[in-house]
């Protein structure tokens, strides 16, 4: 058992592309999950090389990274190969028997249990120590013949299983998106006429903003006119007709600009010696998960050059593809209630007793918000972001506070049910 040799991209380009009469070089990406191997990637190693060679008929197993234990192939020619692949040269053992053994559930379970490290992998020395079930050679041949008799059927079954798994994942994903879209359109829970309307919440927000900003405050709000059209009034200017309201909402709800409804990207004012949570982008879960992990650091070391947040703030990624992958959370159980982290986050902080943080979270994960953000990205390719000014302009549908609580509770129940069903499948 032995691994191959690594080549960086620069070396490949300079030394090993465009040659003829050489060994083909196989990297992890050239071994597919269906066990096929791509020999025509253009990388070729001269025959007089010092690189390790795996011979025709040798099984190759990926032993490091996300594909460890999952990518397995058997060679149809002599090759040089990468250092994340392990070659199994056989002596007196049927190589195809070994190839199928590496795919057996009992081996896969033991391999997974032996995985270590941040990247995830199993060393050659550890693999050497694993048990191997060795039948007589004649029986190995019979086992291989029996497996190959059914191999086309097994391959078709695996293909259908992969398609079903992908389809199931897409269905569950669409279902979760639909639930959130229903929620922000007022279609998930019934309205209660006794609830204080959202217009009262917005009055409270405007009063608090005015108290904070004083003379700098500019009154701004959206209202529905007698003609059932929406208008926006900013300061002393004439109301402007809003022609592109995304969807209808219940009468007890109100539209608002996000910049008028919440505080965006606030700063903390706390003591330098306080221990706080520090969060990197990779520490935030994506999709419809809300989890995160953090390190503990002194405020003095993170107060400059990082995003600030505190307990119950809502965070979402501003950069592609993290934004599209719904990297967002409500901060709970922070160290001493405060934190700082990557500058690639936007922070939304609700005014007291107005917008429920969890409602804000599901809003930023909703299809409407994600689509709006995608349409308003700016920057160069690969570095596009949902900018602060565009975030401020984004429309948010605001339900009465009591309805927000009911919505959050219902989303929780439904998503738990969906995830349980997803796990069982």
Image (spheres, rainbow, N blue to C red):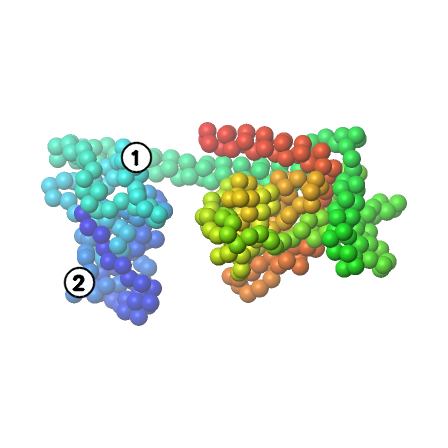
Q: Which of the 4 image quadrants contains residue 401?
A: top right
Nearer to us in this view, 84 or 118: 118
Q: Which of the 4 image quadrants contains residue 160?
A: top left
Q: Is residue 71 left or right of residue 284?
A: left
Q: Position of residue 402 (x, y in %)?
A: 71, 33
Nearer to us in this view, 99 or 420: 420
Q: Is residue 78 left or right of residue 326?
A: left
Nearer to us in this view, 340 or 239: 340
Q: Is residue 410 left or right of residue 103?
A: right
Residue at image mark 2: 50
**Is the residue 355 above or below the residue 375 in the image?**
above
Q: CA–CA distance between discs 1 and 2?
A: 35 Å
Q: Position of residue 88 (x, y in %)?
A: 19, 46
Nearer to us in this view, 129 or 153: 129
At 58% from the left edge and 37% from the top edge, which residue is drawn?
175
Q: Residues within 10 Å of mark 2 (few under 14, many from 20)?
A: few
**Is the residue 82 above or below the residue 335 in the image?**
below
**Is the residue 346 above or below the residue 132 in the image?**
below
Q: Earlier in the sequence, mark 1 or mark 2?
A: 2
Residue at image mark 1: 109
Q: Is residue 341 something one can see in this rendering?
A: no
Q: Is residue 115 something one can see in this rendering?
A: yes
Q: Could you say which disc has been placed on residue 390 in the image?
A: none
Q: Position of residue 305 (x, y in %)?
A: 53, 60
- Residue positioned most to the right: 226
At 50% from the left edge and 41% from the top edge, which residue is drawn?
291
Q: Is residue 214 left or right of residue 411?
A: right
Q: SS for tag 1?
A: helix
At 17% from the left edge and 62% from the top edge, which residue is drawn?
50
Q: SS for tag 2?
A: loop
Q: Nearer the viewer, mark 1 or mark 2?
A: 1
């Amino acid at each position: 058992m032995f691994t191959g040799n690594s080549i960086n991209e620069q070396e490949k380009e300079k030394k090993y592309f465009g040659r003829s009469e050489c060994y083909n070089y196989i990297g992890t990406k050239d071994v597919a999950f269906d066990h096929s191997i791509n020999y025509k990637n253009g990388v070729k190693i001269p025959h007089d090389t010092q690189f390790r060679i795996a011979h025709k008929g040798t099984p190759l197993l990926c032993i490091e990274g996300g594909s460890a234990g999952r990518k397995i192939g058997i060679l149809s020619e002599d090759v040089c190969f990468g250092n994340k692949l392990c070659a199994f040269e056989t002596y007196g053992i049927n190589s195809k028997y070994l190839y199928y053994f590496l795919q057996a559930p009992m081996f896969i379970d033991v391999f997974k249990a032996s995985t270590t490290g941040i990247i995830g992998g199993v060393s050659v020395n550890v693999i050497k120590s694993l048990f191997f079930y060795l039948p007589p050679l004649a029986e190995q041949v019979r086992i291989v013949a029996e497996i190959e008799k059914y191999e086309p059927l097994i391959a078709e079954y695996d293909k259908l299983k992969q398609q079903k798994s992908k389809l199931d994942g897409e269905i569950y994903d669409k279902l979760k998106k639909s639930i959130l879209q229903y929620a922000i359109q007022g279609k998930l829970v019934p309205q209660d006429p006794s609830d204080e309307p959202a217009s009262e919440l917005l009055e409270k927000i405007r009063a608090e903003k005015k108290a904070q900003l004083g003379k700098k405050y500019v009154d701004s709000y959206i209202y529905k006119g007698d003609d059932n059209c929406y208008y926006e009034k900013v300061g002393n200017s004439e109301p402007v007709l809003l022609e592109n309201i995304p969807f209808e909402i219940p009468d007890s709800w109100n539209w608002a600009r996000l910049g008028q409804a919440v505080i965006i990207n606030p700063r903390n004012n706390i003591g330098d010696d306080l221990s706080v949570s520090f969060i990197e982008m990779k520490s935030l879960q994506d999709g419809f998960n809300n989890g995160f992990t953090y390190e503990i650091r002194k405020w003095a070391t993170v107060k400059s050059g990082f995003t600030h947040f505190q307990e119950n703030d809502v965070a979402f990624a501003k950069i592609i593809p993290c934004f599209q992958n719904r990297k967002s959370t409500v901060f709970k159980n922070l160290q001493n209630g405060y934190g700082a982290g990557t500058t690639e986050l936007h922070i939304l902080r609700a005014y007291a007793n107005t917008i429920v943080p969890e409602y804000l979270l599901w809003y930023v994960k909703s299809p409407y918000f994600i689509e709006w953000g995608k349409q308003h990205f700016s920057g160069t390719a690969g570095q596009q972001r949902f900018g602060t000014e565009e975030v401020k302009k984004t429309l948010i549908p605001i339900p009465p506070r009591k309805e927000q609580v009911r919505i959050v509770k219902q989303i929780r129940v439904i998503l738990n049910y969906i995830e349980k069903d997803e796990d069982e499948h």
